[in-house]
């Protein structure tokens, strides 16, 4: 018997791979032979459901950060640094779709996926880049 430990080796990247590249998913497994086609179909369904729900929750959080400002402005650009979005196209696609769906008609909230700026001794985070750009525009 292989035991339960062989099923507990999933990393975040594996959720995305179950949707877009099962061959790579299998190449990352210690015992790929235990993953039947039926098993892979079930895992793909579960991965897509988990990522879709994560995308919805992320959209709600992003939207909530600007919701009280819609009376003052109609168009918003939300800058994000999301490894999850960069590594999982399905999550990023659903995140954008959910954001569009929950934004009121006549309003716009566009997501922009950015990377931190690498600097000597560390990096400049996305929120700090936003602060610098806002100050620069004053």
Image: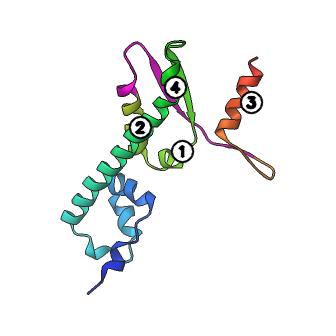
Marks 1/3: CA distance?
20 Å
Which is nearer the eye, 36 or 4?
A: 4
Which residue, given by chain and number where applicable, does mark 1 sit on? Answer: 82
- Give x and y (percent) for residue 8: 37, 72
Residue 112 forms part of the magenta stretch: yes
Q: Quadrant of the C terminus?
A: top right
Residue in the image at 54% along x and 44% along y: 82
Q: Which mark is residue 66?
A: 4
Between the residue at mark 4 and the residue at mark 3, the CA separation in whole angstroms equals: 19 Å
Proximity of marks 1 and 2: CB atoms separated by less than 8 Å: yes
- Could you tell me how many numbered marks the image carries? 4
Q: In this view, does 91 lie to the left or right of 79?
A: left
The residues colored magenta run 100-118
Q: Residues within 10 Å of mark 2 (few under 14, many from 20)?
A: many
- Above or below residue 79? Residue 106 is above
Q: Which of the marked residues, 4 or 1, is nearer the chain's N terminus?
A: 4
- Quadrant housing residue 57: top left
Which of the two labelled residues, at mark 4 and mark 3, occupies the earlier sequence position? 4
Q: Position of residue 126 (x, y in %)?
A: 65, 38
Q: Name the residue under label 2.
A: 95
Q: Distance between the residues labelled 2 and 3?
A: 26 Å
Q: Is residue 85 above or below residue 103?
A: below
Quarter residue 136 falls in? top right
Mark 3 residue element: helix
Residue sitting at the far right: 120
> In terms of sequence position, does the residue under pointer 2 or pointer 3 come before the other?
2
| C-alpha separation, residue under disc 4 versus residue under disc 1 | 18 Å
- Rendered residue at 38%/44% (across/down): 90
Circle 3 residues within 10 Å: few <14, some 14–19, many ≥20:
few
């Amino acid at each position: 018997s292989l035991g339960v430990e062989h099923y507990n080796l999933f990393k975040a990247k594996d959720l995305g791979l179950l949707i877009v590249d099962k061959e790579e998913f299998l190449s990352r497994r210690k015992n790929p032979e235990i993953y039947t086609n039926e098993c892979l179909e079930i895992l793909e369904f579960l991965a897509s459901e988990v990522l879709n729900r994560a995308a919805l929750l992320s959209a709600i959080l992003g939207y909530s950060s600007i919701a009280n400002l819609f009376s003052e402005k109609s168009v918003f650009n939300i800058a994000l640094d999301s490894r999850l979005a960069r590594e999982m196209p399905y999550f990023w696609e659903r995140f954008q779709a959910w954001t569009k769906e929950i934004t009121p008609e006549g309003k716009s909230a566009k997501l922009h996926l950015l990377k931190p700026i690498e600097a000597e001794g560390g990096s400049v985070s996305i929120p700090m880049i936003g602060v610098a750009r806002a100050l620069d525009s004053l």
